[in-house]
Image (cartoon, coloured by chain):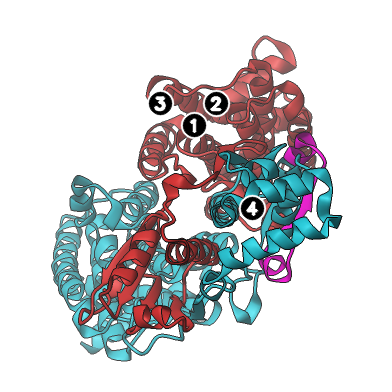
Chain colours: A cyan, B red
Amino acid sequence: MSQVLTLTLKDLRRRLADPAALLVNLAIPLAIAGAMILAFGDIGGGGDSGPAAPKLRLGVVNLDEGFVSELLAGATQNSEAARHMEVRQEPDRESGLKLLRDQEFSALLVIPKGFGSSVLNGRKTSLELIKNPAQSIMPVVAQQITEVGALYASGAAKLLGDAGPRVSAIAESGGWQNAQDIGALAASLAIRFRGVDELMLPPLIEIDETKQDEPAAGASGGFDLISWMFPGMIVMGMIFVGMSQMKDLLRERDAGTMRRQLAGPVGPGTLLISKVLSVGVVVTAACGILMAIGAGAMGIRWGPLLPLAASTSALVLAVTGFSALMFSMVRTERQGDALGGIVTMVMSLLGGAFVPVQIMPAWMLNIARLTVNYWGNETLRALTGGGGWAEVAPYLGVLAVLGLVMTSLGVLLLRRRHLRGAL
Amino acid sequence: MSAGPGGGGAAGRMAAMASVDLRLMLRDKSSIFWIFIAPFLWVGFFGMFNKPQDPAALQIGLAILKQESTPLADALIGAIRAENFRVVVVEPGQTLPAGDDAPSRTLTIPAGFAGSIARREKVLLKFVEGRDANPEGTFATTVALHRAIMRVLGAEALGGFDPAEDLVTVASSWGGGRQIPSGRYQTIPGNLVMFVLIATITYGSSLLARERKLGILRRLMASPVRRAELIAGKALGRVAMAVVQVGVFVLMSLTIYRMDWGSSPAGLLLLMLAFICAAAAIGLLGGAIFASPDAASGIGIVVVLAMSAIGGCWWPSEVMPGWLRTASYVFPTAWAMNGLHELLSWGGGLRDVAVHCAVLTCFAAAAAMLAAWRLKGST
């Protein structure tokens, strides 16, 4: 045992003297994670207060001249709406469309000519909304807001009933000065409005909007892209590191240093175990570095300590065992290089590093389950999702068994190759 | 590793050097995978999950905690359902779904809701937005909830407020702006740009770094080849690698995905040529800068991944924040992707990609000059 430890320590010292390969292997998952954080992590957004409140940018072209359309267009500019909306009125459709094309407005509302008259006279009419296809959710919000406006207009028309045409006639004839007509209209409207105002002006039902507090320990806080994605990057990085470190066996074989070490009082089994062990230590260090970056720079919570320690140990064992097994079959350093990149990327792809396995078709999910990545990703994601022993147990067991089997098989095969003189 | 100084003068010698580089790359088994197999895997895999989506069909998840069962509460839920929500109703006594099924937004209809309305007392519906809920989705939710509430109150106040009787409707259409490229029109151009860079930056750079390390470039100078020809030959080799990679994608897109490459073959040809030159020159620069092949391919792949992601190869740049979209134009990937979208998705022509071609050519010229300057010492 002391021989294994001594050999492992010396091997580690040699490996760490040239950490360039390790750093490059860590840089790949970090580059992918960094790009995703820049793109989707709301950097430059709302700061500590969370993501900035979205603001709808709406263009309005009012082709009508009546007071109803003025009311509708103006409603988008009251103080409450102004918090959530930036509204710009344009004289014609063409200049309105330019807002969508050049200034990232979400939609253009066109109020047609004769709109107000139609509403007041009980004729069906429609508002035109042109949505910007370069955006996803905000045009849908614009449609909903326009439909709210249409609902108000429909409600007002229903409420006015046969008083609507009278209002229209007064408005069109400029009869707002005729006190008798106005008085009669007001009396009629007062009766109609009775009962409506207490329900709808303002609405009797209000929404009390709050943001969920920080989740209690163990509770799910909903989907967090970074906490979901980064475990996949960690497992990918660990496999990159495991494969590139295991390649050292072939380098030592080519340089003849392995054989020379056997001139000392060391058996081939001891030597190979110490080599695999030192790879395991480097993989552990890589995992630790990536997890620390995840916690420090991305705010990822890795959950309770003991399940985390057990999960990372099983993962390190599985990754090291997998690398040993791979390199027991690789003949040259060049083959190792080629295989390392290909196997790691393909396993990451299929194992759910980039796409949730839950949305994969059944046949692909079955393939995913054959990869170390799948079990590693799901274990770490169970932890970042607030899980503990119960949540990681099913994955942990498989990882540990995979790790033990692959490591034992890898060491055995490497030893056999060594005895054959091929290593 | 002879440059083959046979007939054809300088052009022949450069072509010979390029063909040697290309053969060396194609002899490498891993390059066969990355150039000929991985593109099919990547496009097939990501294309499977990147399907065109109709935003209008987007349903926002909402859980309604129903603390009373009355016709008015049911009417409100009915009006909310009509708003295109994916509604989960939690009846009194039931509990909210947890874990992966936990809703990101919940609305509570409190006990005594109908009674309060009957008494004309104000009712507050508690709406909780999950910690990680999308703010735009929440905005859409509150607007839709407001409309549902007005529908229910309108029915109470006006003795019926049937949507079918609405006088004013909304006729909506899409137009004005440009559609975000999706499906194969995002996946294939994105992977094309990324894999061309993988071929030129990782293989092209490491091959050149290896030749520098082994002193092959110096030995080549002993043959009747001028330094400029040698550097141009090496650049041409990387151009050949990129052309092979582009060919694989064009073939794949035409035969498997039946993709329409737009209506401007001239624009497409010029854009591809400019991008290939830029990628080849950057590959040359990588090989000129890095001392070891491992560093060239290792750091090269990190650079390619970062440029591809930020340049819009992995996702449409329209989904990124505005500042990042602007910043992405420091990378040739952003120009190449935007130019390809212009031609393939937005119906643009040669004139629309002229600036893209010019910028990519500038990238190529700058990288080639830097590489030539760095390679002086190695030749």
Q: Mark 1: which amino acid?
A: Leu
Q: Which residue is mark 1?
A: B24
Q: Which residue is mark 3?
A: B257
Q: CA distance from mark 4 to mark 3?
A: 38 Å
Query: At x 63% / y 61%, what residue is drawn?
Result: A188
Tell me, yes or no, whether the two marked residues, 3 and 1, touch with CB atoms within 8 Å: no
Sooner in the amino-acid sequence: mark 4 or mark 3: 3
Can you give x and y, in whole percent of width and height, for residue A313 in the image?
A: 27, 79
Nearer the camera: disc 3 or disc 2: 3
Crowdedness near tag 3: few (<14), some (14–19) or many (≥20) residues, C-alpha within 10 Å: some
User: Can residue A75 be spotted in the picture?
Assistant: no
Can you give x and y, in whole percent of width and height, for residue B21 in the image?
A: 55, 30
On what subunit does the disc labeled 3 rest? Answer: B
Q: Which residue is mark 4?
A: B290
Q: CA distance from mark 1 to mark 4?
A: 19 Å
Task: Give left or right: position of A262 versus A283.
Answer: left
Q: In the structure shown, which secondary structural element does the residue marked by tag 4 occupy?
A: loop
Sooner in the amino-acid sequence: mark 3 or mark 2: 2
Q: Is-magenta flag for residue A80?
A: yes
Q: Mark 4: which amino acid?
A: Phe
Which stretch did the figure color magenta? A77-98
Sooner in the amino-acid sequence: mark 3 or mark 1: 1
Q: Residue furthest right?
A: A177
Q: Is-magenta flag for residue A236?
A: no
Q: Which residue is mark 2?
A: B20
